[in-house]
Image (cartoon, rainbow, N blue to C red):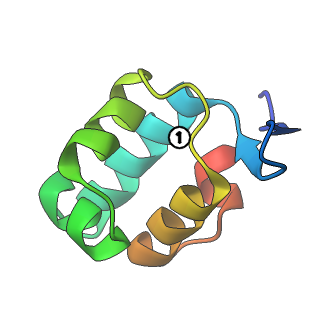
Amino acid sequence: MATASHKRHAGGRPRVLKRCLIGQRIEQWAAKRGLHIDQVADRAGITVPTLNRILTGRIKSPKIGTVLALASTLDIKVEQLTT
């Protein structure tokens, strides 16, 4: 199984790649937690359209802060979203 890689963009912040995997994992963990995607977005402090873009792969490199917030919301480790 492929692992996530980190890449720095112009602003110096790391971004996490492998968004398709992340989208699948977010959906799996949300279902396990009994959370609707709207609830996940709200609790993670991101908009529903942003989360939908992550889930569908239209956001190719979610910011690490977003991934951290999603992992926290789902009560899991970041690695559980990215590997």
Residue 55 position within the rendered picture, expressed as x and y whole percent measured from the top left? 36, 34
Quarter containing the C terminus: top right
Q: Amino acid at mark 1?
A: Ile
As displayed, is residue 73 above or below residue 61?
below
Q: Quadrant of residue 7?
A: top right
Residue lying furthest front in this view?
A: 11
Q: Is residue 23 left or right of residue 68?
A: left
Q: Split into 4 quadrants, where in the image is the N terminus?
A: top right
Please give the name of the residue rendered at 59% of the width and 67% of the height, measured from the top-left corner.
68
Q: Position of residue 10 (x, y in %)?
A: 81, 37
Considering depth in this image, is 4 or 45 the residue closer to the camera? 45
Say what secondary structure mark 1 lies in.
helix
Judge the density around disc 1: few (<14), some (14-19), many (≥20) Cα neighbours within 10 Å. many
In terms of depth relative to the viewer, which is nearer, 81 or 17?
17
Count the numbered circles shown: 1
Q: Is residue 11 visible?
A: yes
Q: Is residue 35 above or below residue 54?
A: below
**Residue 16 located left or right of residue 14:** left
Picture residue at 50% right of the left edge, 77% below the top:
72
Left or right: residue 61 compared with residue 54:
right
- Residue at horizontal 22%, vertical 40%? 49
Q: Residue at x 58, y 51 (%)?
A: 81
Residue 36 visible? The answer is no
Read off the residue under disc 1: 22
- Relative image position of residue 6 (x, y in whole percent): 84, 41
Percent coordinates x, y for residue 28 in the rendering: 36, 48
